[in-house]
């Protein structure tokens, strides 16, 4: 039995991170996860394992290969103790926290929305937009759990799901352009000179951390800009119904 609250078996760890158990085993084979605490033949995983697993998943989503992630983790571990490593993981995880995947059954997905709101046609469109993917064992994988949280909340407010998907598709076109502008800033002003020929040293890890930090700051700027624009648009369209202080 686990000694500490929060310890779990491999399958529970995988479910908590929103991945298949085979993914966790692969990461273990690649040396990306610490060994579990063994009690007899049962391995127990704690919060540190979950933090590391989520970190590896975030780095993969940022475009790192498993080999690159292994080198990055090795550079953090070199010369530091476990506390240093966990602190570094927590910092990077906080910066890359945006996308959290989750696997659900089709029934669980439908249950998130008002009755009969999520039709097969809408699921198909969500798949084409990359909001839902095929998972393991007949389950569905949602690459970003915020689709479930925000999409279902909008549906409960009364916004038709086809409108939610319309807005997502248009918004992605806008954010793609905004992202290109921030990446251009990163390339022009933040990447060290000669980085293309120096991919293996600690400068690459530092640049990756800077990019993650820029992503975090870009999100804050976008939220602030949207708040200002939303207040102005609502005031212009709705007059006294929506004052700037209430948006």
Image (cartoon, rainbow, N blue to C red):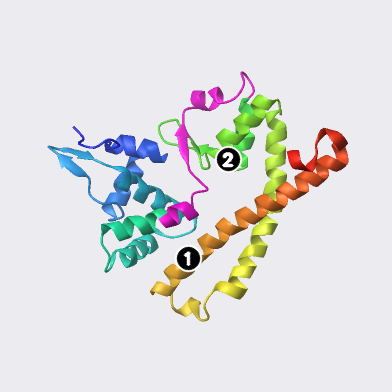
* Residue 106 highlighted magenta (yes or no): yes
In this rendering, position of residue 92 left or right of residue 229:
left
Question: Is residue 54 something that shows in the picture?
Answer: yes
At a point 70% along the width and 51% down the height, the residue shown is 173
Q: Position of residue 133 (x, y in %)?
A: 52, 39
Q: Is residue 247 visible?
A: no
Q: Secondary structure at mark 1?
A: helix
Quarter placement of the N terminus: top left
Numbered label attached to residue 237? none
Please tell me whether residue 82 is drawn above or below residue 36 in the rendered image: below
Locate the C terminus by quadrant: top right
In reply to whether residue 104 is colored magenta, the answer given is: yes
Residue 148 in picture, x, y percent from top left: 56, 34
Horizontal and vertical percent for residue 140? 49, 34
Residue 208 badge: 1
Q: Quadrant of residue 50?
A: top left
Q: Nearer the viewer, residue 127 or 12?
A: 12
Nearer-the-camera pick, 196 or 202: 202
| Location of residue 122 with respect to 96 vertically, above or below | above
Give the CA distance from mark 1 to mark 2: 26 Å
Density class for disc 1 (Cα within 10 Å; few <14, some 14-19, many ≥20) is some
Check the image and report above or below for 164 versus 66.
above
Quadrant position of residue 127: top right
When asked about the image quadrant of residue 76, the answer is bottom left
Nearer the camera: disc 1 or disc 2: 1
**Callout 1 touching callout 2 (CB < 8 Å):** no
Q: Which residues are magenta?
A: 91-117
Residue that carries the numbered disc 2 in the rendered image:
131
């Amino acid at each position: 039995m686990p000694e500490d609250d929060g310890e779990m078996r491999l399958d529970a760890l995988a479910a908590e991170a929103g991945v298949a158990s085979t993914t966790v085993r692969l990461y273990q084979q690649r040396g990306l996860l610490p060994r579990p605490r063994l009690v007899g033949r049962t391995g127990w995983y704690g919060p540190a394992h979950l933090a590391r697993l989520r970190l590896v998943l975030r780095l993969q989503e940022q475009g790192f290969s498993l080999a690159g992630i292994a080198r990055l983790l090795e550079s953090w571990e070199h010369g530091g103790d476990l506390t240093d490593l966990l602190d570094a993981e927590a910092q990077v995880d906080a910066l890359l926290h945006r996308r959290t995947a989750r696997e659900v059954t089709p029934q669980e997905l439908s249950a998130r929305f008002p009755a009969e709101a999520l039709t097969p046609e809408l699921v198909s469109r969500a798949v084409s937009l990359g909001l839902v993917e095929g998972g393991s064992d007949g389950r569905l994988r949602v690459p970003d759990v915020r689709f479930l949280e925000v999409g279902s909340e909008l549906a409960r407010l009364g916004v038709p799901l086809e409108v939610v998907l319309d807005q997502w598709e248009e918004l992605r076109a806008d954010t793609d352009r905004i992202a290109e502008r921030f990446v251009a800033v990163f390339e022009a002003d933040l990447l060290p000179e000669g980085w293309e020929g120096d991919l293996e040293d600690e400068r690459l890890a530092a640049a990756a951390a800077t990019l993650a930090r820029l992503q975090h700051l870009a999100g804050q700027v976008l939220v602030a800009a949207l708040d200002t624009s939303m207040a102005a648009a609502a005031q212009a369209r709705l007059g006294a119904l929506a004052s700037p202080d209430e948006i």
